[in-house]
Structures are given as C-alpha cells and as structure tokens.
Amino acid sequence: MTDPGRLRADPPPPWHTRLGDALPPRYVIRRLAGTAALLLVLSPAVFALLRFAPGDPARTLLGTRSATPEALASVRAAHHLDEPFVTQYARWLTGAFGGDLGTSIRTGESVAAALGERLALTGQLVLAGFAVALLLGLPLGVLAGLRARRPVDRAVQSLGVLALSTPAFAGGLLLIYVFSLMLGWLPAYGPGTGGTDRLLHLLLPGITLGLAVTAVLIKLVRAAVIRELAREHVTFALARGVPTRTVLVRYVLRGTAVPVTTGIGLVLAYLLAGTVLVEQVFALPGLGQLLVQSVTFKDVPVVQAEALLLAALICLATLVTDLTHPLVDPRLRTGRTRHPRPGRSTPDEPAEVKA
C-alpha cells in the first residue's frame, strides 16, 4: 500500500521535449530564413566585388599572348564576360547552388576543388586559434573580474592590450624567431605531413591567431563577471554564508553564459578573417593564402567564391550563437508552456496525494 503522505512527482520530460521548448521549430525556421536572406543580399555585392575593379580579366586570361581585339573578344565570349551584369550574376548564383563555382582563371582547375583542398587546413588553424583564445581568455577574464581594480586585474588587462596591439605578422615572426630559430622546438613554416606533425606545424600559427582575440574575450568575460557579482541574488547568497566557490559556479558563471557565447561567436568570425595574414607568415596553403594569390592575379571566380564562403561561415557562426542562447539561459526561451495532462500537478497547484 502506498504511503498517503508521499507526493506523486512528475517524471522529467524527455530531452527532445526540453529541446523543443527551448528552440521551437518556428524560432529555428525564422533564424534560418534570416541567415539565408542575409546571404542572398550579400551575394550580389560579392559577385560585383571584382567585376567593377580596375583591370580586365580577359587580359589576365590571355596571359603572355598578344591581346588583340579578336583574342579579347574570344576570351570574353568563352567565359561569358560579354554578357550583362544581371545575366552573369544569375548564371553564377545558379551554378553556386549546384556546387559549380566556376573555373580558376589562374590555374584552370575547378574553384570548388581548389577551395575543398584548402578548407580543411584553414579549419584546423581556426580551431587551434579558437582553443588558444578559450584556454587563455576565459580563465584570465574570470580572474580579472574577481580581482577587479586590483594589481592582478591591471596586469591581466595590460597583457591583453599588448596581445591585441601586436600585429599578427609581427607576433608570428617573433614566435618563429624564439621557438624555431633560437630554441628549435617547433617548425617554422609549412603544413606538415599530417597527424602529430600537422599539430606541431599548427601550434605556432594557432598561438599567433589566438592571441589576437584573447584580449577581446578577456574584456567580455571580465565585464560579465563584474556585472554578475553586483547583482542582488549573488550578494544575498554570499550574505547567507553560501560558499564562494558555489556562488561562483552556480550564479556568477551561469549568468555570464549569454554575453560570453556572444563574444565567442564574434571571436570565431574574427579568426576566420585573421587567417589571411597568419597563413602568409607561416606559408600555410590555406584559404587565406589562396585569397591573396587570387587577388594578386585578379582570379575573379576564386575571389568571388571564397568571399561568399567566408561570409557563409561567419553567418553560420552567428546562427549557432543565436540558437545557443536559449539553451544556456532559460530566461531567453521562447517555447510554449507545456500544459500538464489530466491528473498532473502544475507549479501553481499542489501535487496530488496518492491514496
């Protein structure tokens, strides 16, 4: 026989129900549609990026051959350069949706294949820089916030400003001089052959890339920690004698989740843009080096495709950040309130007592 004094507790909802409450399909679809609309707005600007720049792509295609009017007309017709801008854009956008990004003017290979070969290396470099930024920025930001306006705080902020003020090429050259030439610990350039060798080759570039954004993350985390420490519920918990570590983990760090995730999204966007200089310094054949070479030789299809790819990756990082906010902070959830089944208790009424 069941104890009459025992209250019947509702079982916790399954994970997919909790996920649906935090991220309702309508909210997700609206965010996806907004990202797609943004890319559609950016695509004409990306396509026109080099079309209206000084110079003639047809002359680049001819190379060292004589640029006679007949030869230029033949090249323009073969690459549809003689068509109106709208027609060229429609053709390019249709091909992009089908995975056909055109042919490189400089090398003659498929643009999609060229990007695919270099995307993995750039992705690994971004992940290395992201790991460095998180490992340094998050703990140092929390430390600076907890020791605000003290010597430790001033030292951390000074180091952050120094890292932010150092250009990527200067910091990379300094790291190469110290750890490659003087100490001989790490390789100076190149992507490596894979596995552990690839990791060793990406260590210095990853540190160079991550240090540039560590100061931004320190500032965001420090400000969020100071703001949470000043809130009434944190002050009340400390006054009641709740251990400081518990207050820090359950209240302070939890309250900083939204601004920190927003900052992480911005850091990812900056890392994608910062790979250009870092890959040049360390001779890494990634997307950044390909972009520099393509701009130099006015390789219009490659520049357009890579600019669109980088814009899509940045939009994707922003989208993931927006979808993460309701998961880390219940106050931002827009899901519907679940109605209990008959016989179930709600937060506003007492639970049933089993007889």
Image (cartoon, rainbow, N blue to C red):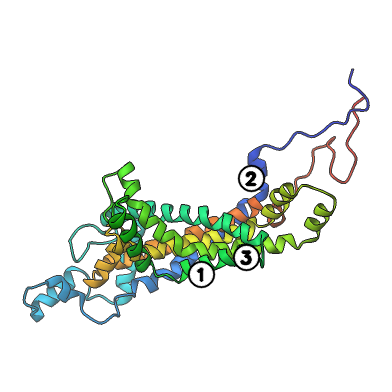
Relative image position of residue 59 (x, y in whole percent): 15, 76
Q: Amino acid at mark 2?
A: Leu
| Residue 32 appears in the rendering | no
Q: Residue furthest left?
A: 66
Which comes before the other along the chain, label 3 or label 2?
2
Name the element at disc 1.
Answer: helix
Q: Is residue 103 visible?
A: yes
Query: Are dots 2 and 1 in contact, CB under 8 Å?
Result: no
Front-lying residue, 161 or 30: 161
The N terminus: image quadrant: top right
User: CB atoms at circles 3 and 2 under 8 Å apart?
Assistant: no
**Residue of label 1:** 161
Relative side of 85 to 349, left or right: left
Residue at 32% from the left image edge and 63% from the top image edge = 288
Residue 13 left/right relative to 51: right
Of tags 2 and 1, the one toward the viewer is 1
Q: Amino acid at mark 1?
A: Val
274 vs 171, nearest the viewer: 171
Q: Looking at the image, is mark 1 or mark 3 nearer the viewer?
A: 3
Circle 2 crowding by C-alpha within 10 Å: few under 14, some 14–19, many from 20:
few
Residue 236: where, in percent of width, then height? Answer: 83, 55
- Element under label 2? helix
Q: Give, as a three-letter code, the residue at label 3.
A: Pro
Kindly identify which residue carries mark 3.
151
Which one is closest to the eye, mark 3 or mark 2? 3
Residue 108 in the image: x percent, y percent?
17, 61
Residue carrying label 2: 19
